[in-house]
Amino acid sequence: MEEFAFYGSLILRCIIVYFVIIFALRVMGKREVGELSVFDVVIYLVMSELLAISITDVKVSIFRSLVPIAVLAALQIAISWILLKNKRIRDLFDGKAVIIIENGMIDQQVMRKERYSIDDLMAQLHDKDLSSPSEVAFAILENNGTLSILPKHSCQVLYPEPLISDGELNERVLKAVGRDEQWLRAQLKKKGVHAIQDVFLCLLQKNGLFIIRASRNKAGGKHAGRS
């Protein structure tokens, strides 16, 4: 009888934990596994350990063991909101994307710094049906560890990173493309944009600027509109 009660409690805990996991993942937002930041991975690892304990340790009330999980979920939501609003803090938590190949030239210093081997690089190129770095316009090692490759034959941008993202000017990118803020503001005015803060995304393409404006919806939030 005691064994039956034990397994009954175990099954009930599994069911509760299952729905808690589904609810927590829905609340914390939709992100693919490959897009998880270091912070996200840490949160999920700790939560998985706590969930395992809440299932196996029948001596502890499951609702009491779910309290730290709720705290972690709230922490993840709060920090994600802060990261969304502040690029500097976002770069601190998530890191920055780095360019490994630019116009067919490999940046060996960046590869050494990121501990990214030439074998890894060539494997990624072959996976994209590319046989040589000379065929690559840009290869960017994203902050989540994936390598994004822009072949020369299909690349439409002069630089893979945005000049403006979410209303913030990227001076490093401006310098990389040999332009200054005065030039950018002049180009924006030609498009009818009078402030950098009004731009959600701005990329420098071969045929000029690609701009998505940031506008406010009725609730006071922002939504994007292409220019």
Image (tube, rainbow, N blue to C red):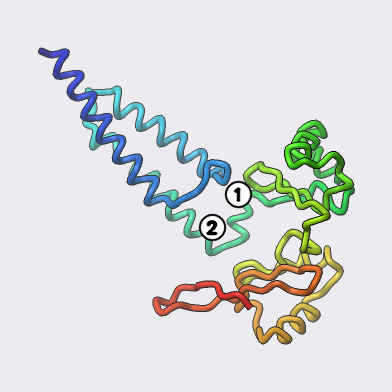
- The residue under the point 50% across, 38% down is 42
Please, is residue 85 above or below residue 115 in the view?
A: below
Q: Which residue is mark 2?
A: 83
- The residue under the point 53% across, 64% down is 85
Quadrant location of the N terminus in the rendered image? top left
Instruction: Evaluate if marks 1 and 2 touch, with contact meaning CB atoms under 8 Å apart.
Output: yes
Please provide percent x and percent y for residue 139: 77, 48
Please, is residue 88 above or below residue 123 in the view?
A: below
Q: Is disc 1 surrounded by few (<14), some (14 to 19) or many (20+) residues within 10 Å?
A: some
Q: Which residue is mark 1?
A: 94
Please provide percent x and percent y for residue 127: 73, 37
- Disc 1 residue type (three-letter): Asp
Please, is residue 171 above or below residue 139 in the view?
A: below
- The residue under the point 62% across, 59% down is 88
Q: Is disc 2 surrounded by few (<14), some (14 to 19) or many (20+) residues within 10 Å?
A: some
Quarter of the image where one finds residue 62: top left
- What is the secondary structure assignment of the residue under circle 2? helix
Quarter of the image where one finds residue 192: bottom right
| Nearer to us in this view, 25 or 87 | 25
- What is the secondary structure assignment of the residue under circle 1? helix
Quadrant location of the C terminus in the rendered image? bottom right
Please provide percent x and percent y for residue 34: 57, 42
Please provide percent x and percent y for residue 4: 15, 16
Is residue 104 shown to the viewer in this render? yes
Please, is residue 95 above or below residue 41 in the view?
A: below
